[in-house]
Image (tube, rainbow, N blue to C red):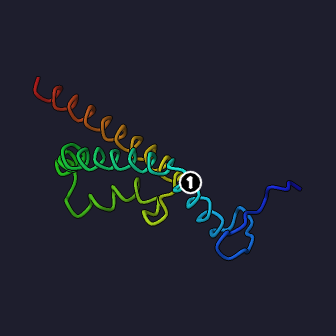
Amino acid sequence: MSKFNKILDPNSGLSYTLDDKKATDILQKYSDISGRTKRVNDDFFKFREYEFLTMTNKIYPFLTTIMNKDKIAPYVNKYLGKFSKHNLNEVNMKRYKENFLEFENHIDNLISNSNQKKMYTRT
């Protein structure tokens, strides 16, 4: 067994196994102190701006052309609801970004297919 499977909480003096939620919180706090989390958060906030603009200017407008408005939220949640926004630590941020970019790619394919169908129906 590894000697490095626990972390000590400097505030309480208690130790936690690394798979414990409290251990994750302690590690996150240490990374906040180091400044790395600030860079990660800054990048993620920029990504969230990109996500917002993409959803507002591309995804929602397209989805309203192919489905009823009441079906859009469940459809988007099916793809993006996998990650709790309350636990967006560094690892989950990376996964969330990858998941959103996959969803955007999925929508791009739907848009492309829709445009091809429109082109063929016009001729």
7 to the left or right of 53: right
Q: Quadrant of the N terminus?
A: bottom right
When the figure is inspected, residue 54 is found, relative to residue 33, above or below; the finding is: above
In the picture of the structure, the residue carrying the numbered disc 1 is 31
Residue at position x 38%, y 47% from top? 42
81 to the left or right of 25: left
When the figure is inspected, residue 89 is found, relative to residue 115, above or below; the finding is: below
39 to the left or right of 25: left
Residue at position x 23%, y 35% from top? 114
Q: Where is residue 44 drawn, in percent x and y?
A: 39, 48
Q: Where is residue 101 drawn, in percent x and y?
A: 39, 41
Q: Nearer the viewer, residue 11 or 108?
A: 11
Q: Residues within 10 Å of mark 1 (few under 14, many from 20)?
A: some
Q: Nearer the viewer, residue 74 or 93?
A: 93
- Mark 1: secondary structure: helix
Q: Residue furthest right?
A: 1
Amino acid marked by disc 1: Ser
Q: Where is residue 26 drawn, in percent x and y?
A: 61, 64
Residue at position x 16%, y 32% from top? 118
